[in-house]
Amino acid sequence: MKTMDYLLQRRRMVERLLRSGMIKSKEVERAFLKVPREEFVWQSARHLAYDDTPLPLGTTGQTISAPHMIAIMLEELDLKQGSKVLEIGAGSGYNAALMAEIVRPTEGKSSDMGYVTSVERVRELIDFARDNLARTGYSDRVSVVIGDGTLGYPERSEKMLYDRIIVTAAAPHIPVCPRAQLKVNGLILIPVGNTFAQTLVKATKYEQNKMKVQEVCGCIFVPLIGEDGFRF
Ligand code: SAH
């Protein structure tokens, strides 16, 4: 398919997400229009890049989330230019690119040094996400790092804390370390439940060691596997 066709499909996807109320803000709309989803799906699924469905990432058993689910999460996350974000579960890197486009837009002044750090445990996906982000021009605003995200990303947070943490895999509970790596007034968005179905939970750290927890909606994600997640 030609680049123009993808652009048209991307615009149609955004129109659908606007009509259904999943995209609400200008920032999220702009990011979805800017980031080429076809560059982040597995080669064999490219023709399905703009269907509103999760797609398998090769044979890794992992998936890139459906656009409507990502739109819901990005709206709840309420990112600002300059926000420092930790993502747990880089997968394809698509969600990281969308967030990077909001916290530090490609066009315009970039004095606000927004940044996304994305942790991934599957080696093959780290390479995949890094390649996708480099090709699409987001490597300057996103780092994909290997690790168990249930432990957060302590190396970086020794120097700084995050404004936002997003977990894109299903957790049995909100893991402890990432909570500690969040600024006061920061928020963490995470699917919490069993391995079959979860509730998307938004937890706001309104004081040191105090979280206000709200339920957003039902959802289905692949499991968060790690020391403070599911252990298989
Ligand atoms: N945000 C991704 C989709 C992620 S799917 C995208 O936009 O494409 C969930 C990802 O979480 C998978 O890639 C899986 O390997 C990863 N994952 C699961 N447990 C993890 C853990 N403990 N630490 C880091 N990544 C994890």
Image (cartoon, rainbow, N blue to C red):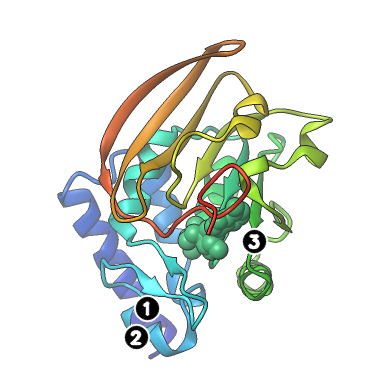
Residue linked to disc 3? 121
Residue toward you, 31 or 173: 173
Q: Nearer the viewer, residue 95 or 212?
A: 212
Callout 2, which amino acid? His
For label 2, the crowd category at 10 Å Cα-Cα, with few meaning under 14, some 14 to 19 and many 20 or more, is few
Residue linked to disc 1: 6
On the rendered structure, is 207 left or right of 19?
A: right
| The N terminus sits in image quarter | bottom left
Ligand 1 contact, mark 3 (Cβ < 8 Å): yes
Residue that label 2 marks: 47
Tags 3 and 2 in contact by the CB under 8 Å rule? no
**Considering only vertical position in the picture, is 26 above or below 32?**
above
Asked if labels 1 and 2 touch by Cβ distance under 8 angstroms, the answer is no
Residue at the image position 29 percent from the left and 46 percent from the top: 23
**Count of numbered circles on the image:** 3
Between the residue at mark 2 and the residue at mark 1, the CA separation in whole angstroms equals 9 Å
In the rendered structure, find residue 204 and report the number of the disc placed on it. Answer: none
Q: Earlier in the sequence, mark 3 or mark 1?
A: 1
Amino acid type at circle 1 is Tyr
Which amino acid type is shown beneath numbered disc 3?
A: Arg
Which residue is painted at 62% across and 68% down in the image?
129
Q: For the residue with label 2, is its CB less than 8 Å from the closest atom of ligand 1?
A: no
Q: Is residue 129 left or right of residue 210?
A: right
